[in-house]
Amino acid sequence: LAQEQEYVLTTQLSKEYMRWQERVQANEQAEASTPPLPLPQPQLSDKGAAMVEQLMAGGAAPSYEEIDEKRERDEQAVQAAAQEALEVAEEMLGWRVRDAVEGKRLVEEAGYTYVDIRSYKDHNREAPRGSVNVPAVIVTGLGLDLKTCTSE
């Protein structure tokens, strides 16, 4: 079964590579027949654009401090929206999403187990010490037997 799975994966990769090569050749031919694009015009900095915008609206130009404060408020709003989206995603998924740094810390300090969802071949080639391999193809229910491999 593992050999058959590897053969199917290799065949799929070969077909995908050939389709990619065809797209690259088609793009190269299209680029050769397309005239070059004009050079972009210089752009104002964020501060310059904000000043022009306020002047166009008929007001006095904002100070650099006002622009910096607005940018900071905007960045905080973006961070708050990203945090809210992460919380919604975690609620929908049913588990907490962690970044790589936090994950590494939890594995090393708190005794968590790293679950590697790559294929057996990729996991056996290179895997974090102590990780458990449960390929995503098994979890998604494609009819393959559940088999775990550990990396020491």
Image (cartoon, helix red, strand yellow):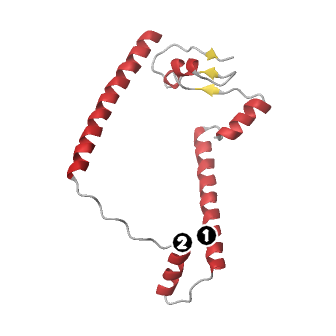
Point out which mark residue 71 bears: 1
Instruction: Give the image location of residue 120, x and y in percent.
Output: 53, 18
Ranked by sequence position, the earlier of labels 1 and 2 is 2
Residue most toward the right? 109
**Gap between marks 1 and 2 measured at Cα:** 9 Å
Q: Quadrant of the C terminus?
A: top right
Dot 1: within a 10 Å radius of its alpha carbon, few (fewer than 14), some, or many (20 or more) residues? some
The residue located at (74%, 34%) in the rendering is 106
The residue located at (74%, 36%) in the rendering is 105
- Whether pointer 1 and pointer 2 mark residues with C-beta atoms closer than 8 Å, the reply is yes
Whether residue 1 is visible to the viewer of this picture, yes or no, is: no
User: Is 98 left, or right, of 15 in this rendering?
Assistant: right
Secondary structure beneath dot 1 equals: helix
In the depicted view, which residue is nearer to us: 123 or 96?
123
Reading the image, the residue beneath label 2 is 46
Residue 78: quadrant of the picture: bottom right
In the depicted view, which residue is nearer to us: 103 or 95?
103
User: Is 2 left, or right, of 8 in this rendering?
Assistant: right
Instruction: Give the image location of residue 98, x and y in percent.
Output: 66, 40
Vertical arrangement, residue 82 with respect to residue 93, above or below: below
Vertical arrangement, residue 105 with respect to residue 144, above or below: below
User: Is 54 left, or right, of 70 in this rendering?
Assistant: left
Secondary structure beneath dot 2 equals: helix
Residue most toward the left? 33
The residue located at (49%, 80%) in the rendering is 53
In the depicted view, which residue is nearer to us: 99 or 95?
99
